[in-house]
Image (spheres, grey):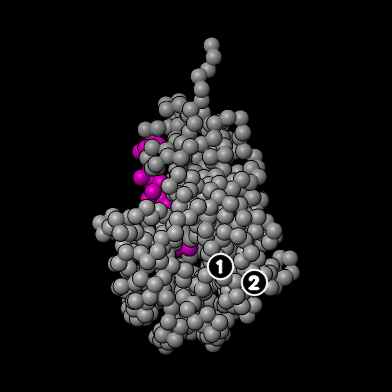
Amino acid sequence: MEEGPRVARSFKVVTYGCQMNMHDSERISGLLETAGYVRADDADTADVVVFNTCAVRENADNRLYGNLGHLRPTKVANPGMQIAVGGCLAQKDRGDIVTKAPWVDVVFGTHNIGSLPALLDRARHNEQAEVEILESLEVFPSTLPTRRESSYAGWVSISVGCNNTCTFCIVPSLRGRERDRRPGEILAEVEALVAEGVLEVTLLGQNVNSYGVEFGDRYAFGKLLRACGGIDGLERVRFTSPHPKDFTDDVIAAMAETPNVCHQLHMPLQSGSDAVLRAMRRSYRQDRYLGIIDKVRAAMPDAAITTDIIVGFPGETEADFEQTLEVVRAARFASAFTFQYSKRPGTPAATMEDQLPKAIVQERYDRLVATLEDITWEENKKFVGRTVEVLVAVGEGRKDSATGRMSGRARDGRLVHFDAGGNDGIRPGDIVEATITYAAPHHLNADGRPVSHRRTRAGDAYEAGRLPRTPGVSLGMPTLGAPAAAPTSATHCG
C-alpha cells in the first residue's frame, strides 16, 4: 500500500534580545524552511517552537522559563510537538534547561545554529532531548540560508563575537572571540539583498569598528562603508554597534563622504564617570567619548547620535552619576537605551563589592530618563517645519490604524508618523517626503499630506508578499523531502 504525501511540519521562532539575535532568528527560519518546514502563525499551533534567547538582562531566565511553562500543557496535549531553545541563554545554561524544563526537546548554542534541523530530526527519532553546545563557531552564520523578515531593510553580519572584556557583559563568553567575514562575502550578501529590492542595510557586529582585526587591516571598516557606497540601488547604510576605543577618524570621513551612509551613530556610553568606566573595563574615558562626538558633528552637523547607558553599576557614587548626566547634557543624544544594572552570573561585576540598593538605582534611573527626555524633546522640536525623507515601514506606529497615519524612519533614524492622505498607494518600502508639524521626545509627526511619494522595488516586493531569501551552505541538514507531521499520541513527553 502506497503512503500518502507527507505533511510538512510547521514552526514558530520566538526572539528575545538584540538585533544580532533577530538576525540569527532569520537564519533559523531560513534553515527550517530549507529543510521543508513551513511557518506557523503562533506558538500554540506550531509543530516546532524555537526560542532564540538573550542572556544580557536579569529577567531573561524568568521570561524563558515562564514561556516554556505556558507551552507545557500544549506539549502534553500534542506529544508530537517539539520545543527548541537556542541563543545566548542556551549557551550559558546548557543542560540545565532540560533539567528545569524536561519537556524541551532540543538545546543548541550560539555556535551551531546550523545543526538545528538535524537536532530536531534526531530528537524526534530517538524520543529524547538533544543538547548540543559547541565552544567555538562551526560555520560563519551568514553562510546559512536566511529567510528575511523585511522586504525593504536587511541586516548583514560583518563579524561575530567580541574581543572586549567589559566586566558587566556576558556576551564574549557566549559568542566567543571576534571572527571577521571577508569584505567580498559581505558585499556579495548586500548586493544579493539589493537585487531583491532591499533599500536599507544595517551592518552588524558586537564591535563593528574593530572589524578587520582578524586579517590585519585596522581601516577595514571605513573601506567597507565606502564600498557599500558603490552598490547601485542601495539607498541607506547603517551600522551597529561601534566601541569608542576603536573609533578612527577614517570611519567619520567615510560616513561623511559616502552618500548612502546615514548620518546616524549609535555609540554606547555606559557611564560618564571615568572611575566607573575603569571598573567596567571600558578602555576610553569621558574626554575621548565627547571628542569623538565633536569630530562627528564637525563632519556631519546633522548627525543623530544615540547611545546605551547603565545606571547603578557596583560602586557608582552620586558624583559618578552626576558625571553621566553631564555627558548626556553635553552630547545631546537623539535617543538612548537606558538600563538599570543587573547582576549576571559569570561576569566579574556580579562579584564586585558595593552592589547598590534597588531604591538608589531606581531614583537615579528616573532622573536620567527625565533628563534624556528633556533633551530629546528639545532636539526633536528643531525639526518642526523641516521636510524629511521617510522610508515607510511596517509596525513602527502602534496607533497608525486608529490615527490614519503611516510610519517610518528618517535617514537619521528618527521615527516619523505621517498622514498617508487616504494612503494614495503608499506601501511599506516606498519613500515619502513629509514636513514635520509636531515633535515628541521619541517621535515626529507630519500631519499634512506627504510632499512627495516615490514607489520603489521594495514597495513592489512588499505588495507582492515577497521577502528576500539569501541562500547558504546547510550543514548536517535532512534533505529528503519535508519532515513528516509527527503522530499526535505515539510519543510520551518526558
Dot 2 and dot 1 residues touching (CB under 8 Å) = no
Kindly identify the amino acid type of the residue bearing the numbered disc 1.
Asn
Q: Main secondary structure of the magenta part?
A: helix
Residue at the image position 48 percent from the left and 48 percent from the top: 461
Residue at the image position 49 percent from the left and 31 percent from the top: 8
Residue 327, position as x, y percentages in the image: 45, 84
473 up-or-down from 297: above or below = above
Number of residues whose C-alpha sits closer than 10 Å to that of mark 1, classed few (under 14), some (14–19) or many (20 or more):
many
Residue at the image position 48 percent from the left and 84 percent from the top: 273
Label 2, label 1: how far apart the Cα atoms are = 13 Å
Residue at the image position 53 percent from the left and 64 percent from the top: 236
117 up-or-down from 250: above or below = above
Residue 280, position as x, y percentages in the image: 53, 76
Q: Nearer the viewer, mark 2 or mark 1?
A: 1
Residue 26, position as x, y percentages in the image: 52, 50
In front of the other: 43 or 408: 408
Disc sitting over residue 339 in the figure: none
- Residue 180 falls in image quadrant: bottom right
Residue positioned most to the right:
216
Examine the rendering and report whether any part of residue 464 can be seen: yes
Segment tinted magenta in the rendering: 56-76
Examine the rendering and report whether any part of residue 102 can be seen: no
In front of the other: 464 or 122: 464
Q: Which residue is disc 2 drawn over?
A: 222
